[in-house]
Image (tube, rainbow, N blue to C red):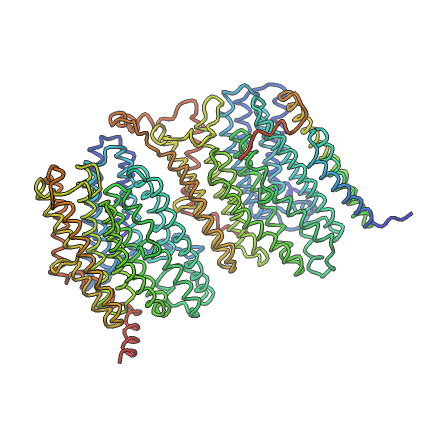
Amino acid sequence: MIPEALILVPLLTGLACLLAKASPRAVRTLAMQGTLATLALAVLLWLVHMKWLAIDPLTARSLLELNLPWIPALGVSLHLAPNGLSVLMVLLTALLGVLSVAVSWRGITQRVGFFHFNLLLILAGILGVFQAMDLFAFYFFWEVMLVPMYFLIDVWGHENRHYAAIKFFLFTQVSGLLMLLAILALYFLHGRSSGAYTFDVARLVDTPLPSPVAFGLLLGFFAAFAVKLPAVPLHTWLADAHTEAPTAGSVILAGLMLKTGAYGMLQFLWLLFPLAALDFAPAARVLGVVGILYGAMLSFAQFDLKRLVAYTSVSHMGFVLLGIFTPNELAWQGAVMQMLCHGLGTGGLFILVGYLSDRLHTRDMRAMGGLWASCPRMGGAAMFLAMAALGLPGMGSFVGEILILIGVFHVSPVLAIVASGGLVLATVYALWMMQQVFHGREKVRAADLRRTELGVLAVLIVLLIYLGVYPKNVFDTFNSTIKHSRTFNSLMQQSQIEDP
Amino acid sequence: MMTRDLLALGPMLITAGGAVVLLLALAVCRSHAFASAWSVLVLAAALAAIPMTWPGAPASGDLLNLLAIDSWALAFWGIIFGSALVVCLLGFEYFRPLAVQAEEFYVLVLLSATGAAVLAAADHFATVFLGLELLSVSLFALAAYRRDQAISIEAGIKYLVLAGTSSALLLFGLALLYFHTASLRLSGLAGPLLAGHPDTIALYAGIALVLVAMGFKLGLAPMHVWTPDVYQGSPAPVSALVGSVSKAGAMAFMVRLAGVTLTGTPGVRNGVFYGLLVLAIASMFTGNLLALRQPNIKRLLAYSSIAHMGYCLLAVLPMAAGAALDRQAVFYYMLAHAVSILGAFGCVCAASENGREAQHVEDYRGLAWRRPVLAGVFSLMLLSLAGIPLTAGFLGKFYVLASGVRNALWLPAVCLVINSGIGLFYYLRVLGTLYQREEAESPDQFATSTAPSALLQPSPQLLLTHLTLAALVVLLIYFGLMPALASLPM
Amino acid sequence: MNIPAGHVMIVAAVLLATGLFGVIVRRNIVLVLMSLEIMLNAAALAFVAGGSARGADGQVMFLLILTLAAAEVSVGLALVLQLYRRFKTLDVSAAASMKG
């Protein structure tokens, strides 16, 4: 009931935006209404999941699940069944959806209808990815969101947009096809061993896989997820795409599209290939730590403000990768927290950079400086977001990073110590950015934030602080997934056996 | 011949008879509108007759020495007649402003569709040759149909020489097979191949020549050299015909041939398997790499179709096992490819003005802001060729990949993945050109250009073309979401 | 005199090769068409040879090939006329503008 509505509402709103014979203003209003409705549905989904599921499981399930046969001959069904992790991601998506319509209000003046069509189509695709429990449907949504994102970058982007758009599309598409190969192999292996051909995750879990095969399949999935995440050797598309995309595009890329990679790892890799993932985890953790340090250093080396923020994503998502491949509850909770906070925090930074470059018509930090004097509100907001990026206690990202580090420490103290170096580097780049742009000699002046602009950023900042001081809601929601996860329980037992 | 046989032949008799009647009628009175309406009617009738004939004739009777009218053939007849119907619809408004007499175009389209249909159902060397010649001869007449243009004649001549050569090679190959097995029937090959006749050089040479000839028809590398020239020089509706009807007929026969030879003696089996494997991989890379920097949209589509035939061979390779899934994969791939390539050339037709074809990629710069609906349709077709979900091309690629993975053909499957990546470069290049914004444009200009009221109304001269494209889009999305046709028993 | 079928096949193969050679090296379109014709006839001869010991099947194929080859060549000659009208030459290399 709710899952399909979550996909249909943005989809239909998007079509209406494209086809409506309306003024740009009316289109924007329509898109805003659509995303607000999506947000309301997402909150409803969360409430049903948290409250109703315990009281009346039967009715709640019927609200939370959709299982329609799609291609019966192949055992493909449109199976949407959000669990705790999905619910959190859906909430983040819906929220950032509203904000990206809001930030495009003034920035996008050309082909408004087509812009919002693409924006809402991406949201629909991402919401599908976060809810699909059928691998075919998952792959379908996974690919479907690429095309509108391509248009978003290619049509409304900055100077180097064609290159960035093609690079983005290419990286994600090819890695996605590797995942498709793995999905197909899993499908046939399961079908041969059980006689039932299906793409349903819940049933594919039981596939008996010889360990080299499982490892190969895991790599296929990992390739797709690692490109989106992005893990270090595959991160090169990110800086270009983020930098060239319009503000709303950057927000969606950083806030949501990167999360689909992390979500896939957390949701599917452990579930489908628990043993292979355990074997692979040390390598993935090293990749994560490399990402943390390398991303932070690259980001320090940038003069383009948007590029700087883009590279902080590599660093932050390195933490997520590290957390995901550390099989204990602390690290996983931390990874989920970090995903949410990165979505909010980096989304906020991109919005801020968007406001700044709208005013100054440049993103070069060397041309900026002393902006605090002319725009104190912007400076204040930037300060908050920078603190969130560097993981100041009281901000959600602090909770996430510290939980990941504690979790990793149980498994590999050395990696935890090296990774915490990332926190130091984060302080360096965040403060350096603040110093370059807002402090020092006053090189430029600009108009301060308008009230609506401040409102957008305030929403993000309040949420970041809320997650920092009261993370219980997130933990409870995700817990509902962990506690029911057979894989997780068996992993816990294994690590307990190994521990002493 | 019995009623049963006549019924089975129904769709083909309708098109063949329709062509003859049209030819006679044109001797009495020439009318473009009549010729076009008649051929559309004939092809629609042929299409409608297919479900009535389904699932084909029982496997006995005189007729069936020559033709195997089974569900496989009938399914491909669906692609062939449907594509020919679309070509006729596109041709009407394409030829109307031109000085050439357009009526015979329809006769030739009907004949080529009949030829492709014969080829798709051929089970006897005589019908293989008959079908192939009927198809080729009409096609090179069609390729040269725009006598007002030098490149059209050039395309016709090139196609004549290459198709003639490939027919002769095919025939010689068939003669060698006949010499070896003493059977003129394709399915008759299976017995001698299995029964351990000693393999002779005649057998190997025969099979090789037939494969080479079919490679010519399908445009597989390295026999692909004619493809770009013919696609570029022919009138756009004819290029669409070459990409859909001719490819479908040849692929249907290729699968029959592979089904027989891949179950043969180990020597034959390995030879054919590795031969097809090399052709498949070579076609994928050749097509995609040559398309990368291609500035002419028709040549680009030609190179893309070379690569697509390479992809499709991935599902032909495991034909020995004879599983329905692999046949269904080939069928669905050809169906999806036909819809996409027809749509793409339909867009070329729609973008052309007064007989000047919009051949250059640059002609399409910023099309999205001048004619957004057309650009949207073109984007969908390109995305389908690139195999992106929501479109038929995605499910086609999915089925082919599934067939490859199921049979553990990892090398060609991985090649397909790599080539999908290479292919994206040029599809996205064209796509990007469509949506390129003109920098000098002022905001208020834009406001008028997005008012959809003016844009949703197609220009009256191209009403039929636009309606055809709309129907193709519906099919493209439908086949991309609901692959019911892929589950036909084959 | 009894000629083994295999020998006839060899003659046919030589004819085929001759025709193919002609198609490749000849510039004059009429000669190219003639070479095509030689190739088709080589195949027809091969059918006759292949079927010599087994009834009339091969000879039926020969008739079929003869007819269809005539059809092909007649359409081909029509194209030759067009080529001549447009380029005032029978040299196929005149019609080689498309590249890429």
User: Where does the image place residue A436, in percent across and percent down from the top left?
Assistant: 16, 47
As rendered, which of A206 and A420 lies closer to the eye? A420
Q: Residue furthest bottom?
A: A500
Number of numbered discs visible in the structure rendering: 0
Of B308 and A293, nearer the camera is: A293
Residue B367 in view (yes/no): yes
Task: Give x and y (percent) for residue B310.
Answer: 53, 47
Instruction: Examine the rendered structure and indicate whether residue B218 appears above or below residue B197.
Output: above
Where is residue C17, by image quadrant? top right
- Residue sitting nearer the eye, A96 or B330: A96
Expressed as whole percent of the image width and height from the top left, the position of residue B42 reads 56, 32
Residue A324, by quadrant, is bottom left
**Residue shown at the point (34%, 27%) measured from the top left:** B455
Quadrant position of the C terminus of chain A in the picture: bottom left
Q: Position of residue B232 (x, y in %)?
A: 53, 32
Image side of residue B362 versus residue A91, left or right:
right
Residue at 23 percent across and 42 percent down: it is: A247
Q: Which residue of the protein is positioned furthest toward the right in this rendering?
A: C1
Does the image show residue B44? Answer: no
User: For the point 52% across and 58% down, which residue is it?
Assistant: B409
- Placement of B33 over or under B13, stated as above or below: above
> Closer to the camera, B92 or C84?
C84
